[in-house]
Image (spheres, grey):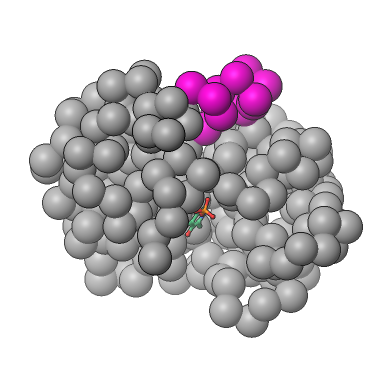
Amino acid sequence: MSAGNNILELLKELPSTVKLVAVSKFMPNELILEAYNAGQKDFGENRPQELSRKIAELPSDIRWHFLGHLQTNKIKMIIDGVTLIHSADSLKLISEIGKEAEKRGLVKDILIQQHISCESTKQGFALGEMEEAAAFARSVSGVRVCGVMGMATFTDDQEQVRKEFRGLRATFDRLKSTIFSDCAYFEHISMGMSGDFNIAVEEGSNIVRVGSRIFGSRY
Ligand SMILES: *Cc1c(COP(=O)(O)O)cnc(C)c1O
């Protein structure tokens, strides 16, 4: 199987309302180009250095998504080339993204990351912090909050995963009906990876971030 075929298969499986982000971290340019040549335009990376190199080397009509923990001192490296930052996970980061964007006369699209898994290693705001984070982010003029993002626990327990996605969906609905009730652009729920995107889509995801299912194992 090639990355290009895998893209075409996935697009057949996914409802047309769900955006596929091909997560190309650690992958060489030639594999990314295979997916690109199959029509894929949205790619995701989680390391600023690697992303900025790939932005320079690969076609300019690729839309790059940033998915990983972002240190504030690395914002400059990626802000110009990135379409959507999925992983806004602290008030400081949101505020700094806003500042860097304003310096450039931009408004940067972000998603607020909620910690939905039982693992302590995955970043994001706790459920109880989401409202404050969202209200704060809405007040930052250099960012536009387009929705929420989360990563489920890495487990075979599908009911656990479903419960976590359902929780993120509930957060989205709550914010959409309150803080962002007048914001058509608040519309994205980024959830689901290679192992769990089917459940995520059933629970309301409209952006899935799929890596190994397209490009093979990273290890
Ligand atoms: C690596 C990564 C993915 C893709 O993971 P796969 O299991 O390879 O599909 C999705 N989201 C984030 C935030 C990631 O870091």
| 14 is within the stretch colored magenta | yes
| 108 is within the stretch colored magenta | no
Exactly how many numbered labels are in the figure? Answer: 0
Q: Residue furthest bottom?
A: 120
Residue 217 found in image quarter:
bottom left
- The residue sitting at 74% across, 75% down in the picture is 118
- Horizontally, residue 79 falls left or right of residue 45, namely left
Q: Nearer the viewer, residue 113 or 17?
A: 17
Q: Which residues are magenta?
A: 8-20
Query: Could you tell me residue 4's position as x and y percent?
Result: 38, 27
Q: Residue furthest left?
A: 57
- The residue sitting at 31% across, 62% down in the picture is 47
Q: Can residue 47 be seen by looking at this rendering? A: yes
Q: Can residue 116 be seen by looking at this rendering? A: no
Query: Could you tell me residue 189's position as x and y percent?
Result: 65, 41
Q: Nearer the viewer, residue 136 or 187?
A: 187
Residue 97 found in image quarter:
bottom left
Quadrant of the frame with the N terminus: top left
Q: Residue furthest front?
A: 1
Query: Could you tell me residue 18's position as x and y percent?
Result: 62, 27
- Horizontally, residue 25 falls left or right of residue 33, namely right
Where 139 sits versus 15, above or below?
A: below
Quadrant of the frame with the C terminus: bottom left
- Horizontally, residue 177 falls left or right of residue 134, namely right
Query: Could you tell me residue 152's position as x and y percent?
Result: 69, 61
- The residue sitting at 52% across, 32% down in the picture is 20
- The residue sitting at 51% across, 44% down in the picture is 213
